[in-house]
Amino acid sequence: MGNASVGVTYGLHRSLGITTFVTGGLQSAALLFRPKTTNKYRKYWKSYHHFVGYSSIVLGVVNVFQGFEVMGLSGSYWKLSYCLVLSTFIGACIALEVNAWVVFCRRAEEEKVRREGGGEVSQNSNFGKGRVSY
């Protein structure tokens, strides 16, 4: 693509695009090397996976804004539309992340209660005793 437009270079946009492409490829390759959940290096892999994944997303978003500048669409409806779609995705991601933390905290609390021996007994073991727990 660089040879098609002689004399016109967009170094930052090109660098961001290449970096985004490489980090996306690293994310795909990371699946091949994912350790088992019992492996002691799993926590390092998870940190790497999250860092590279979020970095790739941020670089992609910044590169799209850089592309708007390159095309001269910095004050257009295209940019406004992209911002609206992006903010919708960000809102959905935040809602899903909050939901995941709520579920995680509930499960951790239930596991703590179960370990301490104060957990409720299941419905089958209370059969005929007048106590029912759901």
Image: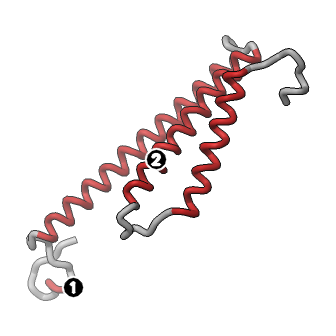
Q: Residue at the spot x=59%, y=30% of the render?
A: 61
Looking at the image, which is closer to me, 92 or 7?
7
Color encoding of the figure: secondary structure
Please give the residue where the numbered disc 1 appears in the rendered image.
124
In the structure shown, which secondary structural element does the residue marked by tag 2 occupy? Answer: helix
In the structure shown, which secondary structural element does the residue marked by tag 1 occupy? Answer: helix
Q: Residue at the spot x=67%, y=29% of the render?
A: 15
Q: Measuring from the top left, give residue 38's x and y in whole percent.
A: 36, 70
Report crowding for label 1: few under 14, some 14 to 19, many 20 or more residues within 10 A (C-alpha).
few
Query: Would you place residue 59 above or below residue 103 in this image?
Result: above
Q: Quadrant of residue 8?
A: top right
Q: Quadrant of residue 75?
A: top right
Q: Measuring from the top left, give residue 93's x and y in whole percent.
A: 47, 41
Q: Is 58 displayed left or right of 103 in the figure?
A: right
Check residue 42 in the rendering and tell me which mark sits there, or answer none: none
Q: Measuring from the top left, give residue 104's x and y in whole percent.
A: 30, 55
Earlier sequence position, callout 1 versus callout 2:
2
User: Where does the N terminus fall, quadrant-wise?
Assistant: top right
Measured in 3D between alpha carbons, the distance from the residue under mark 1 to the one under mark 2, in whole angstroms, is 42 Å
Residue type at numbered disc 1: Asn
Please give the residue where the numbered disc 2 appears in the rendered image.
50
Q: Is 57 displayed left or right of 8 in the figure?
A: left
Q: Residue at the spot x=67%, y=41% of the render?
A: 21
Query: Mark 1 and 2 residues: CB-CB less than 8 Å, in contact?
Result: no
Q: Is 5 displayed left or right of 43 in the figure?
A: right
Looking at the image, which is closer to me, 41 or 108?
41
Residue type at numbered disc 2: His
